[in-house]
Structures are given as C-alpha cells and as structure tokens.
Amino acid sequence: MTLRDARERRVRTGGVELCVAELGDPEQPTVVLVHGYPDSKEVWSEVAARLADRFHVVLYDVRGHGRSTAPRPLRGGFTLAKLTDDFLAVVDAVSPDRPVHLVGHDWGSVQAWEFVTVARTEGRIASFTSISGPSLDHFGHWIGARVKRPTPRRVGQLLGQGAKSWYVYLLHTPVLPELAWRGPLGKRWPKMLERVERVPGGDYPTGSLPSDAAHGAWLYRDNVRARLRRPRPDAYAHAPVQLITPQGDAFLSERLYDDLDRWVPQLTRRTLPARHWVPRTRPDQVAAWIEEFVTSVAGGRPAPAATGRHADRFAGQLVLVTGAGSGIGRATAFAFAEAGARVIAVDRDAEAAARTAELARLAGAAGAWSEPADVSDEQAMEKLAEKVHHEHGVLDVLVNNAGIGLSGSFFATTADDWRKVLDVNLWGVIHGCRLFGARMAERGQGGHIVNIASAAAYQPSRALPAYSTSKAAVLMLSECLRAELASQGIGVTAVCPGFVNTDITSTARFTGVDEAEQERRRQRSARLYGLRNYPPEKVATAVLDAVIGNKAVVPVTPEARAARLLSRVAPGLLRRIARVEPRL
Ligand code: NAP
C-alpha cells in the first residue's frame, strides 16, 4: 500500500483546512504521523506503507504545508496552541472514540511533545514516538540548568547544541529565509538532501517545498524564543514515550535528552546510526520500532523497556553470527540476544548452533534461530543467504566469526593445509560479506559487518604462517570493504583478539608432527590459554561496542593492543619477536 492509495479528507479548524490522508483498516489502532520542517506528510510515505498492513495510519499536512491552507496572517498563526487545536481536530475526525498513537519527526515531534504534555489532550494519546525533535519546554529547562550550574562539561554541551542550532537563528531573520526558499535554496534542497543526508531521490520532497519552508519559518518565530525563555514547569508526558535518536543528527545533540526521564514516566530509548531524516533513510527500522511499541502499548503490555546493555540500539535488529556454536561466536550471539536482537546462529555443528539459539532465546533475544552451514562452502552459503532473506529479511549486523586454528612452520604446511585454513578463515568471510553485504547495500538502509580477524593479522610469527596470512587478509578485506561501503552507511570492523580461552585450541591443527604429538600440543596450548583465561564474553562486548562506535580495527586483550601499538611504533621489535620459536 502506498500514499497514492490513501483516502483523503479535509478537516476545517481555526480558519485553515487541513489535508488528511488515511491508509489501512480503521478498526486497527490508529497511528498519526506528524511531519517536520521543511516537509509535508509525504516525508512519511515509506514508513506509512510499512505500517498500513497492521494499523490505521493517518497523516496530515501541518497548516501552511503541503495541501493544507495557511493561516492569515502568518505571524501568530503557528503557535503550539493552534497546532494542538489542529491535532485535536484531526483526531476528532479520524478516531473520535479511541486514543491514537502519535509519531513525530523534527518539528512534527516538537509539536507532538506539546500535544502529549498539555492537559487538554489527556486520554486522546495512547503513546508517542519522538524522532529528532525535542520539547521546547524540556529544551528550555535543559538550557536553564546548564546556565545556572555551569561546569566545563555542561558549558561544552551548551556550546555544542548552540552550534548545531545555527539555522534556527537564521530562520528568525525577517524575509531572507522566505526569499532563499522560494529562490535558489528551494531548487537545490533535493540535491542537498541526497548528498548530505543521503536521502534517496524520487518523489520526495514534493513540489510544495518552497512554500512549506517559507510558511514553516513561522513555526520557529512563533514559538522558539518565547518557550525557551519561559518553559512550562509542568511539561510531563501523560502517555508512554519512545525516543528514537539518530546518532549522526546534524541539528540535535544526543545530550539534549539526558534529563528526559524526569519528564516522562515511561520512557523507551532507541538509537540509530543515521542522520536526521530517518523516516526516509531508515524506514524499515523506524517502522519496526513504531510497530513494536504501538503493539505492546495497544495490547496493554508495558512498553518495551530497554533493559539489556545496548538494547536501545539492537532491540529487534536482525543479527547473524557464524561459528556461533562455540567460543567467541556463541558469546557474541548471547550478547546480541541480551540486547533484545533477533539472532541467527550459524555453525557447521548443527546441534551446537541449535543449543546457542535455545540459550539466546532464554537470554532475551526477540527471536533466535539456528542454521547449520559450512562457511567455506559457497553453495551452502548461497542457500543460507536465500533462506535468511526469505524468512527473516535483510541483516542489520553480520558477524563473520567462524574460523579454525593451524600451527606449523611454512615448509611443514602442505598445500592442502593452506587450502583448508584459507577456505574457512578467508573464504568464509568473503562469502559472508558478499552474500549478506550485497543485500544490505541493496536495501540502502545501513548495517554493520564485523569480521573476526586476530592479533596474528598484524603480529608476524614463524609458527603461524598460514593462520596469520588468513587473518591479515581478513583485516585488509575489512578495511577495503569499509572504504567501499561507507557511503552507504554500512560500517565494517575487524576485531582482533589475542589469546582467548575457547575450544579453538582443542580443534586446532599442528602440522609436521604425528597425531600423538598434535594431541600433546593441543592439550598444552589449551592449558596455556586456560591459564591466560581471557573470557570470550569480553570479546563479545568489544564486538557490540565496535558496532556502536563504528570502529575500524579493534584489538581485544592487552597483548593484542600491545602488539598493535608495536606494529606501528616499533615494527622491528615485532619482527624480532616473530623469530622466536615457540616451545610447545
Ligand atoms: P571455537 O571455540 O573453536 O569456535 C569456532 C566455531 O566455529 C566452532 O563452533 C566451529 O565448529 C565453527 N566453525 C569452524 N569452521 C567452521 C565452518 N567452516 N563453518 C561453520 N562453522 C565453523 O573458536 P573461537 O576461539 O571462538 O574462534 C572464533 C574466531 O575467533 C575464529 O575466527 C578465530 O580464528 C578467532 N580468534 C580466536 C582467538 C582465540 O584465542 N580463541 C584469537 C584470535 C582470533 P567446530 O567446533 O565444529 O570446529
């Protein structure tokens, strides 16, 4: 269903006529989407289409925007009180008997904060999802608190937000903004959005942009200064609120929401690695979070709270981990599960993968499945990718973790040994990146790929030529892919652990020695790794942190960090260490 299929009506209120569009079954819970500046209701078209199967979706052009008429005179025609009148008139028309679920972006969110915090709308709003638009009252108190008690950190926060608000000052100048929007800025805006905000082109923004932007300047002039100077002391939300914060928002600092728990009794926080226009750039994720939130509130269940570490970021996201039957892979699957993600555990050992999925469910995953697959088998990986995309959709996070150990000098390593280790450690990663990464890129809504390399990727050793080569290749592949996918909002990270206490020692192969000696060496290295006792859970934590911070290369364990440092400042010393023959 698209906005073109919408039923339209006109709603008269306070001297203006609002253009209201409806999609979906009116018997279902009503979700009202309010657009921001400079926009019209079409900014929501992608999100509305995704919600229309489940909900009665209502969108309207704010007064003076799109196909709604503008108040006369413009000055004083856009106060928050009048915008609240409009909202109530729309709700009276589309959902007179049941409270609605409100969603606002940018100025749509700013005004929706007013709706959800004034007494006259009590009982009319069931929930509110706020995206990139703070309450002016909360903002006023936020500024006041920092001016009254300035610490260096708080002054930094004030200056930071002050710098991000440059356009607000410009919009307060008379006439100039109108001239710019009706002239060159209006013409260039679509291209600017595409280039700077990565908003895909097409039928958005609509032709009404210049007049939307010119009229909308009054949203700022009629409200901002007055409210920031005298914020209401009682701006408490009377409905549960979900706050979606894009981390790369050029106009709003994340710090603005630090004090929000004070104003909102039931607050769910979500963060997104994206810029300001998420209804256009991340419609899947935005729609999924709205759906989850509305469904739980409408069903009388408590709003999903962000409980686990990083649940604000990963709740509901689709994450696939290879080699998830053991060690670092299993711990990583659990960490994502605890953050409320949907987890797919892949391993060549079907039973081990199934066990990981079972435990992930218990750990809090929003869903957990297991798939047996050998990552080195191209056809098996193609089938896996087909199945995953068909049954679950496009991945948000891929962790290429499966790997095997191989130790032995270069001349003791046969061609077959080389093939085996490269097939799993390198080709397994290539297959994963190619098959799952391609869909991520095609979807165009970002994502993240984590490749588990190793400190051996940058620390040479006479004992691990094949293993180290495979991991160095994974490191370089990750760097190249990171460069290629950056413009599509897909992050790529190489995680490089040192010695981690997992089963890898008991399955590793030692070349050039007989089976009995291999077994002895396995046991000895297992003992040494056990003594070192660095838990795989810490690597899992580093994986989640790396995704959140979009880090390029992450050495984990002190020895991995030390080797990384030496590889940069004293590579000669690392080369000398590489010559030492390990005693196993
Ligand atoms: P692990 O405990 O042996 O876990 C690896 C898992 O991957 C096992 O379940 C293994 O199954 C599976 N696997 C192996 N080959 C596979 C294939 N072709 N297809 C699908 N699954 C496969 O090892 P780990 O220590 O967690 O290692 C995970 C990753 O971290 C590896 O890439 C490793 O190179 C890297 N790493 C580990 C350390 C460390 O000290 N542990 C250090 C640096 C880097 P099987 O049990 O059947 O083999």
Image (cartoon, grey):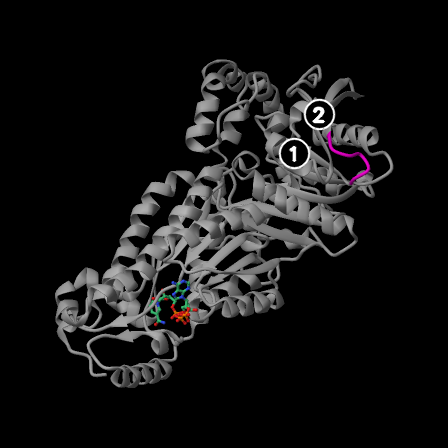
Q: Ligand 1 within 8 A of label 1's CB?
A: no
Viewer-proximal residue, 81 or 382? 382
Give the prevailing secondary structure in the magenta stretch.
loop
Viewer-proximal residue, 354 or 476? 354
- Would you name the residue on which mark 1 appears? 48
| Marked residue nearer the N-terminal end (2 or 1) | 2
Q: Position of residue 199 (x, y in %)?
A: 49, 31
Quarter containing the C terminus: bottom left
Q: Are dots 2 and 1 in contact, CB under 8 Å?
A: yes
Residue count near mark 1 (Cα–Cα under 10 Å), binned few <14, some 14–19, many ≥20: many
136 over 510 or under it: above or below = above
Q: What's drawn in magenta, residue-wise? A: 23-28
User: Left or right of 256: which side holds 58?
Assistant: right
Q: Tag 1: residue type?
A: Ala
Q: Quadrant of ligand 1?
A: bottom left
Q: Tag 2: residue type?
A: Ala
CA distance for labels 2 and 1:
10 Å
Q: Which mark is residue 413?
A: none
Q: Position of residue 238 (x, y in %)?
A: 76, 47
